[in-house]
Image (tube, rainbow, N blue to C red):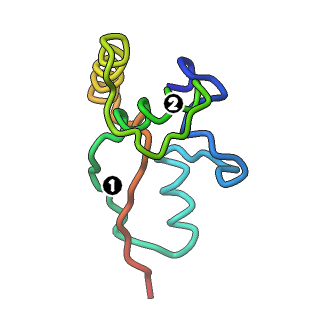
Amino acid sequence: MLKHYGRHWRGLEAPRHLVIFNESSLIQLVKQAGFENIQRLKRPNPAEKMIATSELISKQQLPEKAHRVNTPELKNLLRRIQQHVHNNPEHTEFITLSAIKGG
């Protein structure tokens, strides 16, 4: 989505996002913090809301009510993103881990 929306991509939320982790770097950090039994949890794909929000931001509109894509172009973009994430799960927008603190 970053390629499509550039600076209007909803996922860029500076200064909150100073580091963007991939799965292996996040797991390494969690291990270094003393956690064990680390598992990746599946989450629903947030692509549709991210696209709808980014679209409103790119039009300088408030994104509070963005939930669904509503044009053929955006629906096509959503389908492409969903297919890409399905084929490349490591490219998902969010990484959610479950872990237990070691003793």
The secondary element bearing badge 2 is classed as helix
Residue 85 horizontal/vertical position (percent): 33, 29
- Where does the C terminus fall, quadrant-wise? bottom left
Task: Residue 88: give its label.
Answer: none
Callout 2–callout 1 Cβ contact below 8 Å:
no
Please determine whether, in this image, residue 12 is positioned above or below residue 71. below
The secondary element bearing badge 1 is classed as strand
Q: Quadrant of residue 3?
A: top right
Which amino acid is tagged 2?
Answer: Leu
Please determine whether, in this image, residue 78 is positioned above or below residue 52. above
Q: CA distance from mark 2 to mark 1?
A: 31 Å
Residue 49 horizontal/vertical position (percent): 38, 38
Q: Is residue 29 left or right of residue 49?
A: right
Please determine whether, in this image, residue 29 is positioned above or below residue 25. below
Query: Which residue is drawn at the image coordinates 70% and 47% (left, top)?
Result: 14
Query: Which residue is drawn at the image coordinates 42% and 50% (left, top)?
Result: 95
Residue 89 horizontal/vertical position (percent): 33, 35
> Comparing marks 2 and 1, which lies closer to the viewer?
2
Compare residues 62 and 45 and report the one nearer the observer: 62
Residue denoted by label 1: 40
Compare residues 71 and 43 and report the one nearer the observer: 71
Compare residues 66 and 1 and report the one nearer the observer: 66
Which amino acid is tagged 1?
Answer: Arg
Query: Which residue is drawn at the image coordinates 55% and 40% (left, top)?
Result: 62
Callout 2 environment at 10 Å: few (<14), some (14 to 19), or many (20+)? Answer: some
Q: Is residue 2 left or right of residue 76?
A: right
Count how many numbered circles sit on residues in the image: 2
Residue denoted by label 2: 56
Residue 77 horizontal/vertical position (percent): 37, 17
Query: Which residue is drawn at the image coordinates 63% and 46% (left, top)?
Result: 13
Q: Quadrant of residue 7?
A: top right
